[in-house]
Amino acid sequence: MTAIKFRRLDGNDLPLPHYATPGAAGMDLRAFLPDGPVTFAHGDLKMISTGFAVELPPGTEMQVRPRSGMALKHGFIIPNSPGTVDEDYRGTVMVGLYYLGKEPFTISHGDRIAQAVIAQVSRFETVEAEELSDTARSEGGFGSTGRS
């Protein structure tokens, strides 16, 4: 198993991001809120710190995804989901949370707010072309393949 290096920010007392079960695809990311809880009202979009910076192995990215409990039970989404942390980024890992719930909801220091999935990345050379190969779909856009 390849190691992922995490660097704690000053004052961070949270556990390292880790897999909750042996079969989990994502590591839990927690809210680093040393100044106290943050309350969301319907429609709020806030950036929440995880309290960590990360060093990813070459050829990988960290995908920041919603936790199903936060999304389905409480109404939180990550607007740019999955958010991408590039392998060369060394700043604080932040999670953008958008709240769809009706009643105010408070997130406290240490609450699990998202999950991180480490994924391989393919890189390709880009070239300009006068024509592209034809396919059965061709230029058919959204909904062009029908409903199943």
Image (spheres, rainbow, N blue to C red):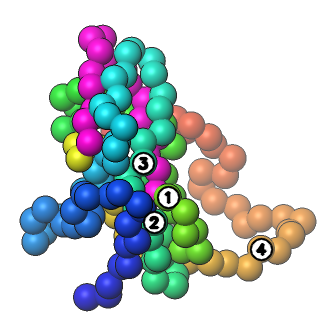
Q: Please name the residue shown 66% across and 52% down the image.
A: 138
Q: Which mark is residue 124?
A: none
The quarter of the picture where residue 77 lies is top left
Cβ–Cβ below 8 Å for labels 3 and 4?
Answer: no
Looking at marks 1 and 4 on the same chain, the residue that comes earlier in the sequence is marked by: 1
Q: Please name the residue shown 67% across and 78% down the image.
A: 124
Cβ–Cβ below 8 Å for labels 2 and 1?
Answer: yes
Looking at marks 3 and 4 on the same chain, the residue that comes earlier in the sequence is marked by: 3
Cβ–Cβ below 8 Å for labels 3 and 1?
Answer: yes
Quadrant in the picture for the N terminus = bottom left
Q: CA distance from mark 2 to mark 3?
A: 10 Å
Q: CA distance from mark 3 to mark 1?
A: 7 Å
Give x and y (percent) for residue 92: 49, 58
Cβ–Cβ below 8 Å for labels 2 and 3?
Answer: no
In the image, 29: left or right of 57? left
- Tell me, yes or no, if residue 114 can be seen here: no
The quarter of the picture where residue 44 lies is top left
Tell me which amino acid carries mark 4: Thr
Residue 94 belongs to the span the image colors magenta: yes
Q: Which mark is residue 126?
A: 4
Tell me which amino acid carries mark 1: Thr
Label 2 secondary element: strand
Looking at marks 2 and 4 on the same chain, the residue that comes earlier in the sequence is marked by: 2
Extent of the magenta region: 93-109
Quickly name the residue at label 1.
92
Tell me which amino acid carries mark 3: Ser
Looking at marks 3 and 1 on the same chain, the residue that comes earlier in the sequence is marked by: 3
Label 4 secondary element: loop
Give x and y (percent) for residue 121: 51, 75
